[in-house]
Image (cartoon, helix red, strand yellow):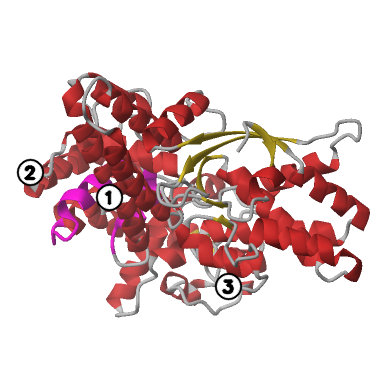
Amino acid sequence: MEYRTTINNIFSPRKHTFAVPTYQRAYSWEKERQVAQFLSDLKDHPDSVEQYHYGHFLFERDEVKPNKFWVIDGQQRMTTAIIFLSAIYQVLSKLSEHQRDSFNLRQEYLISSDDQQKFHTVAYDNNFFINLVIENRQDKVDTRSRQRIKEAFDYFSEQISISPLHEVIKWKELIENAKITTDIVNDKAEATQIFTFQNDRGKGLTNLEKLKAFLMLQIFLSCKNTDTDPNETIGFIEKEFEHVYRAIEKIKIATEDQVLGYHTTAFLPYGDTAIDRIKNSISKLKSEAIQKWIKNFVVELKRSFEFAISIQAKRKTYSFVGDILFLDQASCFPLLLKLFHYHENDPQMEKVLRLIEIILFRLKYTTGSYYTNSLPTIANRYQGNDIRELIKQLWNHAKFGFQPYWSFEADFNRRLDGDNHYTGLTRYLLWKYENSLRDGVREPYMLFPEFKNLYGTPKLENTLDHWMPRNPYEIEYEQEFKDKYLNNIGNLVLSTRGRNASDSNNLPGNRSTYSTLISRQLLEDFKGSWGKEQISLRQSYIVAFAKHYWDPDKA
């Protein structure tokens, strides 16, 4: 394989096959961004320029099959090119005058004459890739990478179908004859070194990808001038990152770089960034200790990504996980990871989560100006030795806050006893109040997915509504009512976007009576006489509930 070559030249040898190793990222190009830009570049390519430039590719030759090449760098571009050529193949194969072109496309880029798949995406997506891209048959879309593959294929198919055939042929030829450069290496250590030096300055790489390259390079460097073969350890790292990338495809509550940041915040000494924390830790090690540290770190990082999936699933249960993620995901996630690492099945876990929820709610629902949140520091210092000591520490913070001079409880109570509660967090408070009412009559709780509308139905999204409307038809409120009662929690109800729209600015007596919310059902008897007295009385009920519910002594 020549250094300067073309897409067609590297694929045309019948026995040449290419594959994305499982330790690399699954397909990540987005339709609206990179995929659309790919086609736009082809459309805008000037006729005066003979070849389209498609960048550099780094391959590692397979140890057993010398004609198989693992795509170490450039897998997103290569995957996109094959998806694009397959979409063209699907069109040309139906045209009698282009049977030869379609035959060549299939044999050179999809399935060779000896029935070998020419390009494999990551193993866990490859059957889907065969079904959709190569054979044009539908398959289940159950990961983000599969969704992106389908979106790219559908986008190309749509654009090709509405474009003149001569333009499509031109695009095909541009990609087939696209100018590329290649490097082929024969072992993982060399591939690591080249990949790192080509990409370490961060062109388009996530922090996780930079980290993987950095760790592999450190292994390579630590083996220099020794008899140790770095390939075995690099292979170990690759297998662990395979699990990481599989997990990434299932995680929806955080990006890969966020999970990396949460993990390093929890487990490593302070640094400005996640990678800084890792570099600082490695810099303090002797050369012979680096490989062991990196292997341990990557195993624990893999576990954190897998625990992120478990944390995500917990939102759909009675756990407080969903609550604290809603209140402040960034500050609580490092401690969540520590808890799952050390106490995943400990029955006292929920007590810890409950105390975190109290801390976060009191920290936000207050008349005080509290900008210190020590949960990440607590996470970093906690070593999993005694969950009972952690519970004591969190109880103290739930009661008194993070600084001894705070009036934590008093400021929380003043917020509740005040007159203006029309803020987003009141919606959360009223959700908890609704569930307390349901508990009293043994009705099923409104679980977090329903409150947060995780299922994505717009009209069912929970909102905050005024029982006496802010701008009623043909009525003008007196100033005292506006100041003390209109935005009072006694006049605020949990609603849905669809319900809020239908209620509009109607007075309570003119609103639809049906509601599944007990907190709204209790207002029915007062629809015709809702005023200051009723608002004050309802506030007293809700405030009494809140002071009891967010009391650390009741946790």
Q: Residue 143 in magenta?
A: no
Is 377 located above or below residue 121 in the figure? above
The relative height of residue 440 versus residue 465 in the rendered view (above or below) is below
Say which residue appears at 65% left-offset and 49% top-offset: 11
Q: Is residue 325 magenta?
A: yes
Q: Report crowding for label 1: few under 14, some 14 to 19, many 20 or more residues within 10 A (C-alpha).
A: many
315 vs 249, nearest the viewer: 249
Q: Which residues are magenta?
A: 319-348
Disc 1/disc 2 C-alpha distance (Å): 19 Å
Residue in front for this viewpoint, 232 or 141: 232
Task: Give the SS element for disc 2.
Answer: loop
Answer left or right for 461 relative to 235: right
Closer to us: mark 3 or mark 1?
3
The numbered dot on residue 139 is: 3
Q: Tag 3: Cα neighbours inside 10 Å, few (<14), some, or many (≥20)?
A: some
Q: Position of residue 502 (x, y in %)?
A: 66, 69
Q: Amino acid at mark 3?
A: Asp
Q: Which residue is mark 1?
A: 303
